[in-house]
Image (cartoon, rainbow, N blue to C red):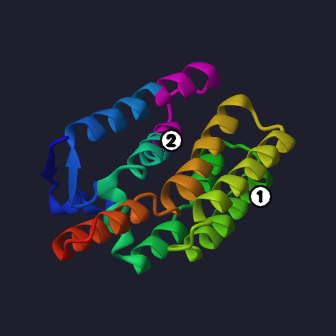
Amino acid sequence: MKYFKMPEFLFEVFGESQSLLEISCTAIFALVGCYFIYSISDIPLNSWQAIIAFMLIADVLAGCIANFTRGTNSFYSKRPTNRLIFIAIHVHLLVIAWLLSEPMNSALIVWSYTIVCAFVVNALKGDFVQVFIAANLMCYGIFLLVYLALPTWFFIVATFFMIKVLFSFAVDHYERFSTASSQGLANNKKGVR
């Protein structure tokens, strides 16, 4: 897959380099997801609140995919402070609930669970159980979402928010591959097979 350098203002979204395939898949998922959520939500796009809410929904959906890319993962893997800030500023779900008059108490519960778990998962960076713990917490989070009996469209948004922040972003998905590749190169240079 061919990678190209991203413009600097997009580093925090896509990292320093990205492939056309990954950018295309991210954009398509955000567009299709927004259309799907719009079609089942009965929310008219006739107010500034609804328009901003759907822009935030598009960001949640796009980030859910983009955070799995090697470029985005690598960018934040090298910048642990930026990763912590990124997790902390993710108030999208609360703003969406506020803009569209959804129950704030449910949104606050889901947001709190997601952010706390994301910090826990992030703290496990470099530990072999990071992915397992993230998956485990994600599964408990799905139980939480079902328990809260959210409207279908908000359930979908909350699910992808949780995936985006807790599993897609907080996990360093490629560290073990980078380490293995680096060790393999070092061993080859030493003549070790």
The single residue placed furthest to the top in the displayed view is 39
118 left or right of 176? right
Quarter containing the C terminus: bottom left
Q: Quadrant of residue 127?
A: bottom right
Mark 1 sits on what residue?
Answer: 109
Crowd rating for badge 2 (residues with CA inside 10 Å; few <14, some 14–19, many 20+): many
61 left or right of 25? right
Residue at left 77%, top 58%? 109
**Could you tell me which secondary element the residue under label 1 belongs to?**
helix
Q: Which residues are magenta?
A: 33-54
Image spot of residue 133 (x, y percent) = 67, 62
Q: Is residue 45 magenta?
A: yes
Foreground pick, 115 / 93: 115
Mark 2 sits on what residue?
Answer: 57
The answer to whether residue 33 is above or below residue 158 is above
Q: Hey, what amino acid is under mark 2?
A: Ile
For residue 47, the mark is none
The answer to whether residue 36 is above or below residue 121 is above
In primary-sequence order, the first of circles 1 and 2 is 2
The answer to whether residue 23 is above or below residue 134 is above
137 left or right of 130? right
Image spot of residue 60 (x, y percent) = 49, 46
Q: Hey, what amino acid is under mark 1?
A: Ile
Residue at left 43%, top 46%? 59
**Could you tell me which secondary element the residue under label 2 belongs to?**
helix
Main secondary structure of the magenta stretch: helix
The answer to whether residue 21 is above or below residue 192 is above
Q: Is residue 79 magenta?
A: no
Foreground pick, 143 / 42: 143
Q: Quadrant of residue 7?
A: bottom left
